[in-house]
Amino acid sequence: MKPIAKIYTDFPDKFGLPRQSGLVKGLKGRVVFEPPYRDYRAVRELAEYSHIWLIWAFSRSERENWSPTVRPPRLGGNTRVGVFATRSPYRPNPIGLSAVKLERVIRDESLGPVLEVSGIDMADGTPILDIKPYLSFADSYPNAVCGFADRLYGQSLKVVIPADISNTLSDGLINQLSELLAEDPRPRYQDDPERIYGFFFNKYEIKFKVDKDLLTVISIEPKK
């Protein structure tokens, strides 16, 4: 398969990304097609849909070998479950699937059609393999049973960003960052309250600590 596009986001690295699409609805990305696919006819009528599926490659998690079991970070990093019972990037074929909101389709003079999307969970430059419309009458199962993921969903942290630090970012970015951190970017097995964690978001390096259910941002500095 050949990538048809790349998505550009505020995350240069995979650490800090939401674990699933749609969890942080304000996080945005731009899908830019590769030159052979910059044909407006290919996205004709796409703007009529509110959401789309992005099928993409775990380009930063490739391994030569695969394992039938993996250790999901949300289960503490010690419990093994079947790889096909998870959305782990370490799979026989490193393919990801994300349902995102289609904000708009742009006509760019140099790049051709560009898709602005939100609710992303992908690092900057992730290759997109295909795009399909999301169909609520076929793709949505509100009463579906979600295994161990159901037991963990909704467990969020209280986030504190001191006023002297939050002034670094706009209100929009602060809201996105707060939602992102509330989902707890750490692997579940890391619980040292004195450990400082860090990741890059937008044009900034974010550093924080976590003590039980409280996450406190220590610094927000421009990337060097």
Image (tube, grey):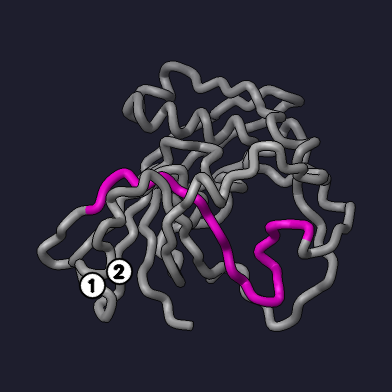
Query: 212 or 31: nearer the eye?
Result: 31
Calculate the distance from the C-alpha at mark 1 to the C-alpha at mark 2. 6 Å
Residues at circles 1 and 2 in contact by the CB criterion of under 8 Å: yes
According to the picture, the residue beneath numbered tag 1 turns out to be 38
Q: Which mark is residue 82?
A: none
Q: Is residue 14 above or below residue 165?
A: below
Q: Read off the residue under disc 2.
A: 33
Q: Position of 146 compared to 171: left or right? A: right
Badge 1 amino acid? Arg
Q: Position of residue 183 (x, y in %)?
A: 62, 35
The quadrant where residue 153 appears: top right
Is 222 covered by the magenta stretch?
A: no
In the rendered image of this protein, does residue 95 appear above or below residue 139? below
Which residues are the magenta region?
85-105
Residue count near mark 2 (Cα–Cα under 10 Å), binned few <14, some 14–19, many ≥20: many
Kindly tell me whether residue 221 is visible in this rendering.
yes
Which image quadrant is residue 33 in?
bottom left
Give the percent coordinates (x, y) of residue 181.
57, 34
Question: Upstream in the sequence, badge 1 or badge 2?
Answer: 2
